[in-house]
Image (cartoon, rainbow, N blue to C red):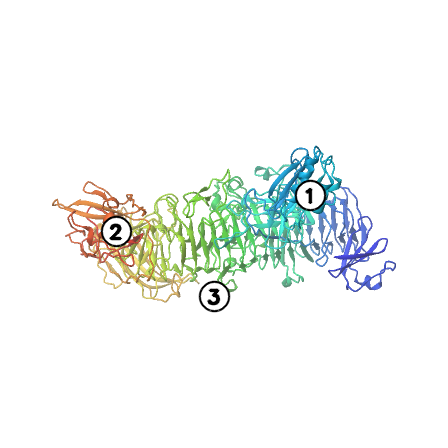
Amino acid sequence: MCVCTCLYRYKCVCICSCLFVCLSILFSLSPIICFDLSPFLFFSPSLPLPLSLHSLFPLDPELQPWMPGHSEAHRVTIGYGRKVLLTSSATVHSIEITSGGKLVIADSHHPILLRTKHILIGNGGQLHIGSPDCPYKGNLTISLFGRWDTEHSYFGRKYIGVGTGGTLEIHGKKKLSWTFLNKTLHPGESQDNSYLFERGWGNRGIIVHVIHPKTGEVLHSDRFDTYRSKEESRRLAKYVDGVENGMILAMVVNDEGSNNLEESAKKTISKLGSRHFHRLGFRYVSRVLTHDPSFISIERLSNSTVLELAEPAEGWGPGDTVVLASTDYSMHQAEEFTLLHCPTCRPTQVKVQGKPAFLHMGEEVDGVDMRAEVGLLSRNILIRGEMDPSCYGNEACKFFSFDTFGGHLKVEHGFKAVHVSSVELQHMGQQSMGHYPVHFHMNGDVDQKGGYDPPTSVSDLSIHHTFSRCVTIHGTNGLLVKDVVGYDALGHCFFTEDGPEERNTFDHCLGLMIRAGTLLPSDRDSKMCRDITHGAFPGYVANPRQDCSATSTFWIANPNNNLINCAAAGSEETGFWFLFHHVPTGPSEGMYSPGRTEHTPMGLFTNNRAHSNYRAGMILDNGVKTTQANDKDKRPFLSLVGARYGPHQDADPFKPRVPALIHHFVAYKNQDHGAWLRGGDVWLDDCQFADNGIGLTLASGGTFPDDDGSRQEVKNSLFVGESENRGMSIPDNRIWGPGGSDLSGRTLPRGVDFPIRGMQIYDGPINVQNCTFRKYIALDGRHTSAFGFRLNNSWQSCPKNNVTNITFHDITSRVFFGEPGPWFNQMQMDGDKTTIFHDVDGSVSEYPGAFLVKQDNWLLRHPDCIDVPDWRAAICSGRYAQIYIQTRNPANLNMQIVKDEFPDRPLELEGALGKRKHYQQFQPVITLAKGYTIHWDQAAPAEIIVWLINFDRNDWINVGFCYPAGTTFTVISDIHNRFDQRSAVLWIVRGWFGIQDKSRLCRLLTCRLPVSLLFLQVKAYNDKEDFAFCSVKGCERVKITAVIPKGSPPSNCMAQAYPRHAEMPIVDVPMPSKLPGTKLVRTELGLFLTVCQNDDGTDYLCICWCLQCVHSNSLKCYRYSNVKKDKYCTFINLCSVVVDRLNKFATVGHLRCFTPSFAFYLFSPSVSLLSLLQRTSEHFLEVKLESYNTRFFHINEDFAYTEVGGWVGGCVCACKLCEFCLCLGA
């Protein structure tokens, strides 16, 4: 607040509460210039300015008023020490400020519009608009005009450019940049507690409405024709007297109401507070209040809404524009509103024109903060590009119907000072390289490290409806970007360009509605990716999801940057994307050594949020192609490629690892992923994931064999499958269907049958600790689960994937390992078959220390494993590791690996690398201290390398490789050192089939058969760190080089190996005890009673299990697909025949299976099932089997369990012609 006194005609002094004095140099527009002054100084209007005031006055005494007029041909140069003050609107061709020149824009009570093609500042030139201590208070617009096909300079066209030695200081009025909605808005809902003061209320007379003071609801209304009758006047007085105290009366005169209006009625109305009622005339509007209307406003407009904000709307005022972010999957549900005058609004309320078309959350939902962001787009200083009505004359017109040639602001190396705050930038940026709304280009260090004090910054900016990015940081370090709103932009919004950009800080920045652009492959959508082929090698065929399609709100090319309190509230692809330039590109070429960014520790990443993005809320993965297109790699320069992140101290892989820390990240309503993070030592803490297709995937660095012992982890975090934010159905919404526990309608991330997962386990190693999972509800045809696995996965699964202290609420399926069907396809890829994780404390399986494995992976199972059919899983114990088997010549073959204990359960693998690679890699998880054989669908490969992965010291397995007869071979054992890429040979064995090798390391079958086995014992001899793939000395491996006779048949030795080398199944690690007081809830189980015939005609009962049973008042049963029926078996549905009598069973039996060749139980159909089941206090029953060694199949003590509504079941044995094993339950 200021009190001003005029000193003489042209100058006034103001004493301000902000301790600044403002000097008004009136001229024609009374601009005000501010400077520091003690609040105790006062001046007489009759005195000239005192000397002390002149000494404090900041204006250069040489500053001259400047009014250049309007001429688009006028080229202005302000140089040679000339200093001018622009005091009025002007149009010029261009302005160049150089050689010590200075331009100041006067602060005026009247708007100033400056139109120009460009402003260039350099060589000591300065442009000042306000200052940090005295922000610009008036309304200023700098409008940049021109077309792309006109003349241009180094900076281009339509620009504000800051060159060497230039100073740019722009400081507008401080306003709150963005905040959160604090109360949910429903479509069409106003929440403004206002009352519509309509004109057309009825016929002639006085119309009265009685209004509720808090809601604005009209409680009662009446019309009094005081033109026709004095009786109507008396009725009006009586009506008013009868209104309850505290209500609001609104009155309007329609046509005429004063002819018979008596004084008694006028006095009654006047007593309520009206000062004008006695002068009522034709259609005179009057409102009468019976109390202080502190909760309601009476409006002439009905189409308005009040927004409840999380903090006071500092600086926001009528006429300003705000944008309200989407809180559903589609970013296109963001809405713009114009602020209205609202005298009754509290500081945290604003009134806007119109009502919302979409649901916008303003609250925490199921523990996740889903409040919509509210961004202010208006500022009192506007820099804009003048636009043509439609696109014209360039390549962008293939993709955009509107003009994309906006203005731009560019800062070059060697500038003197740049600080821009509280400015609006509209229609800026161009669909051409290097021309962005705000662009710092090759500036080096721009903070104290580079000699800039105060450090360079842009803050409180609104950048909206732009045509190429929002803020671009290129070859620049230490820049502060704070409180910036980027809205409706083409291409990556907050963009770091070449890779060397470090120490920049994005603090409290908001980006939303970020669309695809044409500039880089990563900016482009699928259509652009296919159509734009310049830079590609002839014959290039685009793969958009691999090469392009990465439009992101925050595109971070170097991890050493800080992101704090930022929000990515809607992009065509991704919110935050960290990627890596293996070498710096463009003008930054040579700034760092190859691979440096992949090892650079991450800066601060805390309290950020991402929602309403298509691909993911956050991705940490990939790099860009840093070589030009060629015949071997036809993709264009800067297409997306693979990269692996492994942060180390000082970016040196020989120094200790440094984890990348992601703290309090919130991701919700992202269609594909909440976050996909690949790399070594990426750790998340206190994060929230809700309503994402997949909450979180942690992918390993994948740097084998150069892995250095990293891991990824998520701790203390919350996962919500389907929250109470149900979204809304709209006409073009293709993804709407039932969900949640009540099966009510809601928006869905990918499709009605998409298997929603909270934590997706991919490869590993990962650690999931102290996390909570809520509301993962599986439906018929939709396999929703808290834990799941990557679909169609060809890669490895690590037995070091650990989960600890997991809590579940409203969960129907804790884990789902997958089954053939939609989204899962045929489950035939290697990674689909080898999934595993370690339940360290039993919080998932209720068996501490157990492993969960895929139910049909007999490399990992043993006789005591417990089946959980709903999960398609088994709970097992054991010691597990991996072998990587690399093959060459040929590389396109399939491999079968067989565990000697279960020779009739081979695991067939296709390889992880595809059939066109020059080598192949198979990555099975195996049980340690067991024997295996390996077979091929073609002749054995000429080269096999067996890598020992996750083997601790002295861990071993025996493995036999099938080769054709007549093969000669060399076996080498060595250690691959990841640091120097060299191998230390430990031993070499040479031999050929036909001679029995006496070495302790190898034993060979004779060569009398067409194929034979080479047996090796592979053993680890060195220590290993906990999460490293290999030993501290490197990866221990065995290499077999063979000469395969031409024309050899497929190398499949199954018939020769078994039963000769079959082993009795042995449980090396006993199953842990079940946690006391817990029960694993089973909701689906059924029974089949099968009558089978033996060879002698005797009838036997085989009991087989089925899935998809529902326990309610009456049990129903449906036949499961893998229960096979043949001519010897008749199926009887136990759900209808036997289950009704289960409650009569009282004792437990001990079954003995006997047969000369198969295990089955023989009894008469008339035998009661009394001995099979009973009800127990733990709702659990085990039915044990004693079995005998047979030629092909071995059972030790096989059992399984399940529960249905308190009833229990066990596993019995198989019969000759029926499905193996059964689970009983009711």
Q: Nearer the viewer, mark 3 or mark 2?
A: 2
Residue labelled with disc 2: 1224
- 515 left or right of 653 in image: right
Q: Secondary structure at mark 2?
A: loop
- Residue at the left extreme of this rendering: 1096
Residue type at mark 1 is: Arg
Q: Is the residue 283 above or below the residue 68 in the image? A: above
Name the N-terminal-most of marks 3 and 2.
3
Name the N-terminal-most of marks 1 and 3.
1
- Mark 1 → mark 3, Cα distance in angstroms: 76 Å
10 Å crowding of disc 3: few (<14), some (14-19), many (20+): few
Name the N-terminal-most of marks 1 and 2.
1
- Mark 3 → mark 2, Cα distance in angstroms: 54 Å
- 784 left or right of 637 in image: left
Residue type at mark 3 is: Pro
Whether residue 360 appears in this view of the structure is yes
Q: Nearer the viewer, residue 939 or 478?
A: 478
Residue labelled with disc 1: 287
Q: Nearer the viewer, residue 858 or 1043?
A: 858
Residue type at mark 2 is: Leu
Residue 954 in picture, x, y percent from top left = 31, 66
Looking at the rendered image, the quarter that the N terminus falls into is bottom right
Q: Nearer the viewer, residue 1061 or 61?
A: 61
Q: Nearer the viewer, residue 906 or 23?
A: 23
Residue labelled with disc 3: 656
